[in-house]
Amino acid sequence: MTRPATALACGLTLSIILHAPLALAKTPVATGTGGAVATISEQASQSALAILNKGGNAIDAAVAAAATLGVTDPFSCGIGGGGFMVIYLAKDKRAITIDSRETAPASFTPAVFLENGKELDYEKAIASGAAVGVPGTVRGWHEALERYGSMNFKQVLAPAIDVATKGFTVSDTFSHLTQQNEKKFQQFGTTSALYLRGGKAVKPGTLLRNPDMAKAYREIAARGQRAFYEGPMARAIVDAVNRPPAAQGVSVRPGRMTLADLANYEARIRQPVVSTYRGYEIVGMPLPSSGGVTVAEALNILEGYDLKAMPRAQAEHLYLEASRLAFADRNAYLADPEYVEAPVAGLLSKEYAKGRRAAIDMQRAALNVAAGDPYAFQQDPSVPLRPQLPQRRLGQESAHTTHFTVSDKEGNIVSYTFTIESWGGSGIVVPGYGFLLNNEMTDFDFSGPHPNVPEAGKRPRSSMAPTIAFKDGKPAFTIGSPGGSTIITTVLQTIVNHIDFGMPMDQALNAPRLSERNGATTSVEPGFPGSAQARALAAFGHKWANGPEHPPEEIGAANAIVFNPDGTVTAVSEGKRHGIGSALVQKRAH
Ligand code: GLU
């Protein structure tokens, strides 16, 4: 069922494009005192800083930054999606997480992505109402503010409303991403009207306003999260999912979402995954994100080697192999813990890691390994089953999202990754409200048997890995990144670069990224194949994804904060990738 293009002009406020001055200069590293923020967007970092300067805490500033990212980076995140937030509460000296992952509508069954018994084409499944999960972001912000913030929606959404109303300058990266998604966006009238001009991507240097998104934020500012989950905005979402605003002649698979699905949505407060690595305490995101568990398992495997005493290529070979083993387990076992009894304790056990380590050949890449048996290490009699799971190849995943981090002068910290899944999510902009709906449901495995098959109310397994590391009971650094399943390897590699190779965080972030997810080839970035580092690793049998189907591309867009022993903080964003990130501190050290 498609809706004729003529019907969607209603409620659609056109954005106005004007020529504007160049974007603000970004600084990817900043050291100083007070609060700190690192995001991929100058405006989002400025929003967080403005809230910190008004006396808001890290949680308030995080929501302000997130809402602004929804305006300036709408293809990676926004209120049409979901995410995972790790919060450190300085006064209580404890960390807690908020899971605002999208849930499957009540109409979902394991067969939702099958047609005549066959898996649907992945790209077709993305640009559809059927791919849209019940968005969790607004509920997540609500929980964060209500429980741990000091300001209300009205205060923290003000900077984002300002950016959406006054507009922002389209960057090269933004224009390029729009261009990459022209075909998807052309399928939806609301989306073309907002981000395309005559069917083509908006050009760099133009001023892009999004008054509809400003309206959506104003409604949330006035009425709280209910403005999103009940009433006119909820009806507009359900309508866009079930009757996607497809352009004339375009047929798009509709979803089956109800107002009850939205009204019933709940974010979850979850205990973090806590592991240790060489004297650091690593606090990460639990299931349904596989991020925390997989990073922890790989670090446990690596802990048995003296990486810093080894030639770099030897150490990097081990990093790739540890990641491969952890991914084999992630792919086999991890899914929504409310639906599946995943053997998390076993996967996190140091003894289990020892056994996995024994499978590594010091000189030879394994190329593909089987999942291990963590059940013997569960020490949890409530998990008696040892399901024989089929070997899975890594499902298709897109590599987009945003991650950022904020701290305040009291020492509270937020590490937050949120997304709408693919670049531009499902491609559907909700009529009248200016935000894109996610395609998070394609993070489910399309067919089983597998713990991560679609089910009503279930949350698809994620890779998001917002992380905070502690040393001697004090915050040491935060790290996180976008990038689909490469999120896990980016976080893992940055931790190894920083802790084992002793790189300052900016170098740890800017180093070439290698992502091994138990495939025959390792994902690498442009310029890597043929380099001396690549040749040294090739001697161990590693092979690079370097063909026309998987050309090297930028991996991730990480953001970090380092808490220095002298009491200063260093905010670190990307120095090269994704158009360079923006790091700010309240009081800059000179
Ligand atoms: N959907 C992905 C996940 O939850 C994130 C999107 C991405 O980074 O590509 O892991």
Image (cartoon, grey):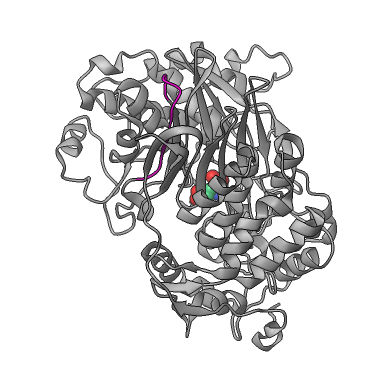
Q: Residue at x 72, y 83 (%)?
A: 10
The secondary structure that dominates the magenta segment is loop
Q: In the drawing, does residue 218 fall left or right of residue 391?
A: right
Percent coordinates x, y for residue 307 in the rendering: 29, 18
Q: Residue at x 84, y 64 (%)?
A: 231
Q: In the drawing, does residue 205 fall left or right of residue 116?
A: left
- Residue 62, quarter of picture: top right
Query: What quarter of the picture does the C terminus occupy?
Result: top left
Q: Does 241 appear above or below 316?
A: below
- Residue 24, quarter of picture: bottom left
Q: Residue at x 58, y 58 (%)?
A: 70
Q: Does 548 appear above or below 49?
A: below
Percent coordinates x, y for residue 572 in the rendering: 40, 39
Q: In the drawing, does residue 433 fall left or right of residue 20?
A: right
Q: Does 463 appear above or below 441?
A: above
Residue 83 in view here? no
Front residue of 194/82: it is 194
Please give the range of residues in magenta. 564-574
Percent coordinates x, y for residue 456 in the rendering: 76, 49
